[in-house]
């Protein structure tokens, strides 16, 4: 008898977490692995946020919080939307969740019926794909290329929308590419959505504060889409709070209420102490967030320079987040010893086992010609990791006409 449900059997393990687990296992065996796989800032959570959490414990914030979040935190998020993004989401339109991942899952599960289509520009974050599966939706991808910095066109979007389209989901700044849509590019996409009022747009803006382009632009700012956009955000990336697990949405009231209902049956309210810490993060001094962004900008410039020195590697130019998504198709079909690089999957495995550098296969994100490299690591680790990667790639050779490596 098979006890596990088809639902869990069809669900893939997160490839990013899978790579991180392999890195830990190799380190436990004494292997010096440079881990450039996880999207986790290497900075400590700012001190004033930690102090707020300690004070919350002393003040007795140890009871069940409201399912949608403490009123004062929802108010602070509402004000953040207004002051930073020129968006009007009342506190009752805000739902606080256990990380932006739960916020996204809530939205997918309350919106998508079996067989309804969810459009994902590819590359996409790995969990979008699996959330669509959980909702029994049908994933429709729009492919993009490195030469266009992995951004879709209005024409591509128009061609992808059908009467069965329910949701369009994307991130800007993007995980895994670091691409950022400009205000004009978002307005052009909004023109398409205006012609298709049956589509809800989910805008994942978790990397909002790690943008190197200046002001952040949200598709929710397009007035023609009022009442149709869900903005997903959180404190993990901007405030180095990955382990605190605190995300949130701003959404149309009917959708916020549905997510509140869904969450109430699964986890209830997000961690009370983390909520008080998030309140301090959103309302307190932003100096450390700005400092981290500038450090990521320097690391971005460094890793682009190092990748450009590797023959056959075509790096994109990330404008936000802390990932780069270079095209490595030059190395598909190469050999070294018992290795035959038939895909980005194999190349990523080759790099961690032979070069001891952990990256994530682009296939996980819907593109088998690329790998994702996180530069949320020190400049020293980036330099060493790229040196090892270059040496490992140099060993890979295409077969000569006679069938031998050349």
Image: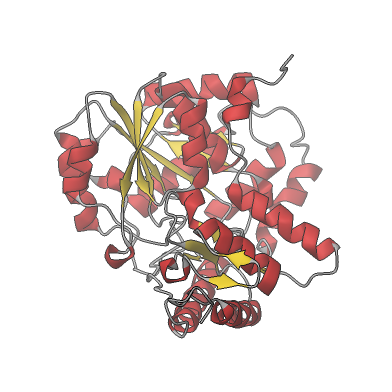
Q: How many marks?
A: 0
Side (left or right) of 348 relative to 199: right
Q: Quadrant of residue 33?
A: bottom right
Side (left or right) of 249 relative to 155: right
Instruction: Please report the residue visible at 51 percent of the width from the left and 70 percent of the height from the top.
Output: 334
**Location of residue 307 in the rendering, given as x and y in whole percent from the top left corner:** 47, 79
Instruction: Please report the residue visible at 56 percent of the width from the left and 71 percent of the height from the top.
Output: 335
**Is residue 334 visible in this depiction of the protein?**
yes
**Is residue 42 visible in this depiction of the protein?**
no
**Location of residue 263 in the rendering, given as x and y in whole percent from the top left corner:** 58, 25
In the image, residue 292 sits, relative to residue 256, either above or below, namely below
In the image, residue 157 sits, relative to residue 236, either above or below, namely above
Instruction: Please report the residue visible at 69 percent of the width from the left and 21 percent of the height from the top.
Output: 4
Quadrant including the N terminus: top right
Looking at the image, the residue that sits furthest to the top is 1
**Location of residue 271 in the rendering, given as x and y in whole percent from the top left corner:** 69, 37
Looking at the image, the residue that sits furthest to the front is 402
């Amino acid at each position: 008898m098979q006890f596990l449900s088809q639902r869990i059997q069809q669900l893939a393990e997160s490839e990013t977490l899978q790579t991180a687990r392999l890195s830990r296992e190799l380190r436990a065996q004494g292997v010096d692995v440079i881990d450039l796989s996880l999207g986790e800032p290497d900075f400590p959570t700012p001190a004033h946020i930690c102090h707020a959490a300690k004070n919350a414990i002393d003040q007795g914030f140890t009871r069940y919080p409201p399912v949608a979040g403490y009123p004062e935190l929802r108010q602070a998020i509402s004000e953040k939307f207004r002051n930073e993004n020129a968006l009007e989401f009342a506190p009752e339109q805000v739902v606080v969740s256990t990380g932006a991942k739960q916020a996204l899952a809530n939205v997918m599960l309350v919106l998508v019926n079996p067989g309804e289509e969810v459009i994902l520009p590819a590359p996409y974050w790995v969990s979008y794909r699996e959330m669509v599966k959980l909702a029994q939706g049908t994933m429709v991808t729009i492919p993009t290329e490195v030469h266009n910095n992995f951004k879709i066109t209005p024409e591509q979007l128009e061609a992808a929308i059908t009467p069965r389209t329910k949701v369009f989901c994307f991130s800007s700044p993007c995980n895994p590419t670091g691409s950022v849509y400009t205000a004009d590019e978002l307005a052009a996409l909004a023109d398409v959505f205006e012609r298709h009022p049956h589509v809800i747009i989910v805008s994942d803006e978790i990397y909002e504060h790690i943008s190197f382009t200046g002001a952040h632009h949200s598709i929710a700012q397009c007035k023609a889409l009022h009442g149709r956009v869900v903005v997903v955000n959180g404190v993990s990336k901007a405030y180095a709070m990955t382990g605190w697990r605190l995300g949130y949405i701003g959404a149309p009231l009917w959708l916020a209420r549905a997510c509140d209902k869904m969450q109430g049956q699964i986890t209830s309210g997000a961690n009370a102490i983390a909520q008080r810490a998030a309140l301090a993060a959103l309302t307190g001094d932003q100096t450390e967030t700005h400092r981290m962004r500038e450090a990521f900008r320097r690391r971005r410039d460094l890793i682009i320079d190092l990748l450009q020195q590797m023959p056959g590697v075509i790096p994109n130019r990330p404008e936000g987040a802390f990932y780069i998504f270079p095209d490595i198709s030059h190395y598909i079909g190469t050999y070294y010893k018992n290795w035959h690089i038939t895909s980005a999957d194999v190349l990523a495995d080759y790099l961690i086992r032979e070069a001891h550098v952990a990256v994530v296969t682009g296939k996980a994100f819907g593109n088998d010609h690329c790998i994702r490299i996180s530069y949320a690591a020190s400049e020293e680790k980036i330099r060493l990791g790229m040196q090892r990667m270059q040496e490992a790639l140099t060993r890979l050779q295409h077969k000569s006409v006679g069938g031998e490596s050349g």
